[in-house]
Structures are given as C-alpha cells and as structure tokens.
Image (tube, helix red, strand yellow):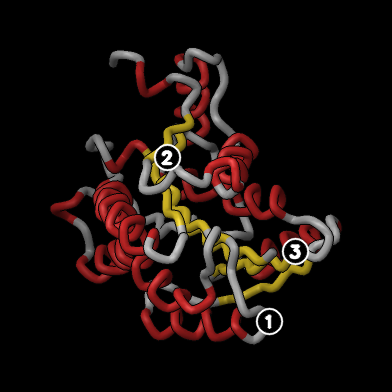
Amino acid sequence: MAILITGGTKGIGLGIAERFAAPGVKVFLNYAHDDSAAERASESIASRGALPHLLKRDITRQEDIAQLVRDIANHTDHLDQIVHGAVYPYSSRILSADPVELEKAVALNGTAIAHLVREALPLLRPGSTVFFLSSRGSKVAIPNYAAIGAPKALAEALVRYLAIELAEQGVRAHTVSASMVLTDALRSVFEDAEARAEAAAASNPMKRNVNEHDVAELVYFLASPQAEMLTGREIFIDGGAYVKPG
C-alpha cells in the first residue's frame, strides 16, 4: 500500500498518516515548512513499521506539484490513497486581503486538488481513493476565514467532478468535512482558537470536539473495500454539531 498526504506532518494529516501506517506501507508526507515537525512525523510513521518519505514541496505552485509526483514515482508505481489536507492559513477579511496571499490561498485551498490528481493519475488504480479535507467555513461566512473557506467550496465542487471522471477507472473521491479540530493551522488563523475550541466542545451534542483520530478512522473506512460504492460525497464528522440550530 502507498498513501500520499499533503500537510501530512501535523494535525489531521499526521493523524491520518499514523492510522494508515503499518509494516511495509509507503507513507508519503508532503509539507512546506517546519522541518523539525516533519522529522518527528517521520519517526512516528517509522515506529509503526511503515516506510516514511518526506517530500518538502510548495504545492501552491504547479511545477512543485509535478515534481512531487515525480518524487513519488521514484519509490512506487501506484498510490492507493491521496489525501489533500494541506491548508494555506491566511486570515483576512475578503475586501482587505492581500492579492498575492489570496491567490496562494486559492491555489492551495482550492485548485490544488485538481492539479494533484491530474499529475498523479498514472499512479492511481482501481480501488484508489482521493480525499479532500474541508470545513464548515466552505458553507457559511466565518469572520476572517474567507481565504480558506471560499477556496474550499471550490475544491468541494471539483471533487464532485473528479468523482465522475475517476469512476471510469474505478477510483473514488470524497470530501471529508470535520467540525472544529484544534490544530496549529487553526491557531494560526484565530488568536482565540483555544477559547473557540472550548466553546465548540461545550455546545457539541457529544460534549467534545472532533479530533484528528476521529477523522483518520473515517478516512480509513472510506478507503476500504467496504465503501466501494461510495464516491463523490461530502461526509461530515461533527458529533452532531452541524444539525443543531444556531
């Protein structure tokens, strides 16, 4: 088995990487910065008997996406899963957003999933599954979240189109949307991230927040043969938070 996870060295991405890590599994971890965190992630994956590969590439850039896939092809002839979890955590009101930063956010949070799958298409095979990690900000206007939420809405639409095209070769595609998970990315967007997380947990019907392990278990199931006839869906994991009024 071989899996690629963008943003795979921290947070939800790392949780997914650790869930799939098993003896002999090739785990490709893409990241853009924080080499120390990447090394710790690699050690965690290796401790489970898997074969970690750290790939430092800026996938806001088309040429880096192409090189990323070439790097992977040097180690495997297939990918069983692609998980796009990397996020460009640019916090701003939309009308005051820096144009350059906004374009980078749209590239990583929005269109990168399409470019990544197109480049990796020769490595996909029947049974492979593509995942995009999204959030509630793609549906509602959260203050200072526009550069993340709006591109994620674009990526969700792209996943639906990808699902139809990929089905021709037996490949599936999903969006997984989690309610609040307290990650480094969230902390970089909101100064009061801890307080927000506490409030979200208190109001959640399950009386706790979703964590990276919850998301990892869902992705693991959706990638399994038991979910063979599920594709093109947005699956929410939220403990019931999104069905409550208010």
Residue picked out by circle 3: 25
Residue picked out by circle 1: 75
Q: CA distance from mark 3 to mark 2?
A: 26 Å
Q: Within 10 Å of the Cα at label 1, are there few (<14), some (14-19), or many (20+) other Cα atoms?
A: few
The kind of secondary structure element at disc 3 is loop
Q: CA distance from mark 1 to mark 2?
A: 31 Å
Camera sees residue 8: yes
Query: In x, y percent, where is residue 231?
Result: 41, 47
Residue picked out by circle 2: 177
* Residue drawn at point x = 83 percent, y = 60 percent: 23
| Amino acid type assigned to the residue bearing label 2 in the image | Ser
| Amino acid type assigned to the residue bearing label 3 in the image | Val
* Residue drawn at point x = 44 percent, y = 19 percent: 240
Depth-wise, is mark 1 or mark 2 nearer the camera? 1
Task: Using the image, determine if residue 69 lies above or below residue 165.
Answer: below
Mark 1–mark 2 CB contact (< 8 Å)? no
Q: Is residue 92 left or right of residue 85?
A: left
